[in-house]
Amino acid sequence: AADAEGAAALAFAELIDRANAPIFSVDLEGRITEWNHYMSQAASVQRDTAIGGTLETHTSPESLNVFLDALRKVGDGTFGLPFELNFVTGPSPVTLLITLTAQLDSKGKAIGAMCIGQVLLKCASDQKTLDKKSSEASDMARKT
């Protein structure tokens, strides 16, 4: 049974890493605990750089405040509506529409949040950039 659980956990981790959507997770203090390939491409921040850090160096201050408020709600057991998170680390800013889902420990207590995003496009040139980043993320995921 333990082997099957371990295999299922590994398969789930690989699914998250190779997903065609930006996904990351944080603990309740806001430290990044997961950062998938798509997130690396969308935010122009590599996984090794992101893990263990915070969103403070990657997002606008206004956007960070909205995120931290949403994270507090997860810790309190309440949930808010999706919100925009603006990443400013790449050659051009990227806005993601983020939803948070509580990550729970074995006793049902919130220990963090899984954040799933959708890239918001502002114009046709954004679509070309997104298509290129999506292709790069797919290539990177196939290589690992």
Image (cartoon, grey):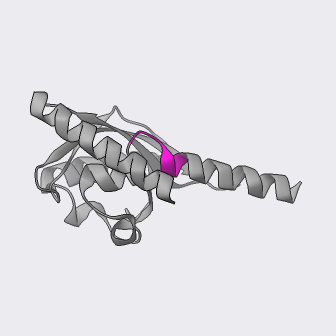
Q: Is residue 123 visible?
A: no
Q: In which quarter of the image is residue 85?
A: top left
Q: In which quarter of the image is residue 25?
A: bottom left
Q: In this view, does 14 lie above or below 49?
A: above
Residue 124 image offset from top left, x and y in percent: 12, 27
Residue 74 image offset from top left, x and y in percent: 45, 46
State left or right for residue 121 relative to residue 48. left
Residue farthest along the top direction in this orientation = 124
Q: Is residue 140 visible?
A: yes
Q: How many labels does the image show?
A: 0
Residue drawn at x 69%, y 53% as measured from the top left: 9
Q: Which of 21 and 113 is in front in this view?
A: 21
Residue drawn at x 21%, y 66% as measured from the top left: 57
State left or right for residue 86 relative to residue 47. left
Residue drawn at x 16%, y 57% as measured from the top left: 90
Residue 22 image offset from top left, x and y in percent: 37, 45
Q: Which of 115 and 118 is in front in this view?
A: 118
Residue drawn at x 47%, y 48% as measured from the top left: 114
Q: Which of 27 and 33 is in front in this view?
A: 33
Task: Assign the N terminus to one quadrant of the image.
Answer: bottom right
Region rendered in magenta: 16-21
Residue 135 image offset from top left, x and y in percent: 34, 43
Q: Is residue 56 above or below residue 127?
A: below
State left or right for residue 30 relative to residue 88. right
Residue 115 part of the magenta segment: no
